[in-house]
Amino acid sequence: MKKLSLLLLVVTMLALAACGATATPEPTKPPAVQATATPLPPPPPTATPVPPTATPKPVPQVLRLNAGSEPDTIDPQKASFVGEIDVIMKVFSNLLTFDSAGKLIPEMAADMPTLSADGLTYTFKLRPGLKYSDGRALTAKDFEYGWKRHMDPDVAGDYAFTGYVLVGGEAYNTADTKKTSKEDLQKLRDAVGVKAVDDLTVQFKLTDRAPYFLSIVAGWNGIPTREDMVTKGGEKWTEPATYIGNGPYILKSWEHQTKMVFVANANYFRGTPPIAQIEEVQINDAAVAFTAYLNGELDITGVGSNELAQVQGDAKLKDQYQLQPGTCTFYIGFNTTRKPFDNAKVRRAFAMAFDKEGFVKNVLKGLGIPANQFLPPGFPGYYSDLKGLAFSKDAAAKELADAGFAGGKGLPEIKYGYSASPRNQQRAEWFQQQLKDNLGVEIKLDPLESKAYTAAVKKLETTPQMYLLGWCQDYPDPQDWFTTVFDSKSTVSHTGWKNDDFDKAVRAADPEPDAKKRDDLYKQSGQILINDAPVAFFWYNVSSFVQKPYIQGCKNTPLDYYFCSTTIMQAKITAH
Amino acid sequence: MTKFLLRRLLWMVPVLFVISVITFSLMKLTPGGPWDKGEGRREMSETQREILNRKYNLDKSEVEQYLYYMAGAIHGDFGPSLQYRDRNVQDLLFDAGPDKGFWESKFGRSATLGLLAVMIGVVVGLPIGILAAVK
């Protein structure tokens, strides 16, 4: 018995230690909104008249946001998630960027790049006099280092694949560091198609024409990390002391799992941003964050379906409310290798048998936009004249009859798989009811535990017949959507769909230098995708938040990397 | 008395060893892996997974992984964090940040709870035990 109690004691202590380290679930990232400070009461009227020329107290330019949770990493060459990119793009800047209209403009580069006649070499000239926040000069060599580090197999960045279009990129990134000699690894690194021709010129050599490469260098890929800082800081180089960047802000302090503070970078080439300090806390409960906003402790916060009623019901809050299209599309996926979804007519019938608008209104409570094509409106690759499969009981019934299953007779058992959670259960039940009411088909709900569901969807043999899927944008280019997801070589569609016409269209579009021809080809592919229906487009997500009215000059766009990133040089806090 | 204490302390070694094997096996037996991204996040490609697995020795057999882990653990090196890719596990457990002491770290707080639990057990249990024995 004595040994048993000792065992129990040790186990208990270990269990307690383990409890402290469980990861908190990721909340949806609220848009950057600073809490507003409680307004100061007006000064009491004085007996003696005060001269009217008294200078007003300057408004503290401090923005208070909620990051939601601690980012897993803020290393530019390892990041993959919006919360991480949010931090990175405050502290670092890339060759190009997007303006508030969604147009590509030069950032660290002096101008848009020149392209060689064969379309395989991009040459960027940097602006003269660029500096990092600590005053050290930024040169082309830093961009070369950033990209080579991005492809380094030891760094193993999630988004290294964006560099596979560079000569030698994939070979270096997939090299087995345990089996390859140091010299050979260095050779592979040297062979990667990025080079600092001189201090102000960066040159990229591509394996194929790729107009979408410009969108990639407008993001966080290939950011010019400081080699001396990475060496100095080693594993901990992302701590504020060594996390030196070239962007509008400096990471001043990072209290892990609690708060990050950013201060304006006077060495940013566009000048010092007007908002002098950004404080980001990590409140991962949406209700708590909302209360903080109401109390004036946050300047911006997300509005979920639980808070929406309160916002709509209050005139002031309603005024502060903003709804932006998100960067994701959700759709019902069909496993085209399993009956009955090997038949396009059946797929189309199901696609037209549910009321997307009703879903957005009743289930999402307005926090969504019904989707009839792959890309969300406002994104390159969205075409307003594409004809979607609109909700129609009659059209759906006709397709089903044409397929030989009139009224649903003769259909095999159909299971709808999803990751078990109360929210997904509610949506699945809605979908099941819709198919019953509109198509007369009874499907079976097949919830799976979250990890088991992810594992099942990965292999076509175990992918459910029908399931819910989504795709979020990596970089704003139709290639990242159409080709990356639905080309028959892709591994992320999980539909097993192969369509030669679609493949031909996107493979011709990807390298096409003529912008109009390229757009037409993608448009064509977009229509094929709708008509052949390997998936049934459902809804686009939205960014829903309230923002204090004293934040002026800010234009929130779907392409923002962080709060107001495209207009950060105009955003400021006014008196309140 | 010393022999008794010594024996108890020595027993801790095999017990901790068994616990480490059980915990390690449980982690390996649960479905999913460290690179599964969960809902709403992009899944990694197979190539990417292979590169990461190679980097963190996850492509080796489970026995080898356990040995790598224990070899480090004995020296207080619990390896890199698979979730927080910029930090290692011992920092996450023991380092509460600049100007913060050991007791404010995650391990420190858990140890505090554990020690309090032991104290309550002793303070309450010892007198009751003595009383029961005497009665």
Image (cartoon, rainbow, N blue to C red):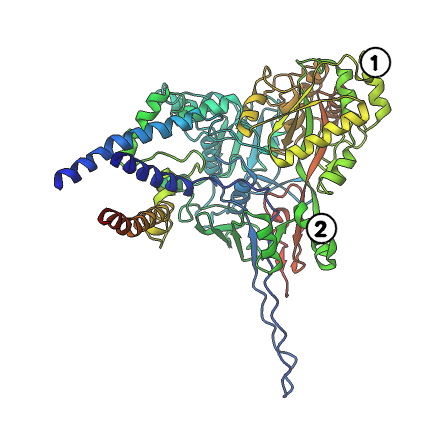
| Position above or below: B134 against A479 | below
Do discs 2 and 1 share a chain?
Answer: yes
Please name the amino acid that badge 1 sits on.
Asp
Q: Find residue A309 and name its label.
A: 2
Indicate left or right for A255 with A387 as reference: left
Q: Where is residue A513 shown, x and y percent of the image?
A: 68, 25
Label 1: element kind:
helix
Q: Where is residue A404 shown, x and y percent of the image?
A: 81, 11
Label 2: element kind:
helix
Q: Where is residue A275 shown, x and y percent of the image?
A: 57, 57
Q: Earlier in the sequence, mark 2 or mark 1?
A: 2
Chain for disc number 1:
A
Please name the amino acid that badge 2 sits on.
Ala
Give the foreground label among 2 and 1: 2
Disc 1 designates what residue? A402
Few, some or many residues within 10 Å of mark 2 (<14, 14–19, 20+): few
Give the position of the C terminus of chain A as an image quadrant.
bottom right
Q: Where is residue A5 shown, x and y percent of the image?
A: 29, 37
Chain for disc number 2:
A
| Residue A511 appears in view | no
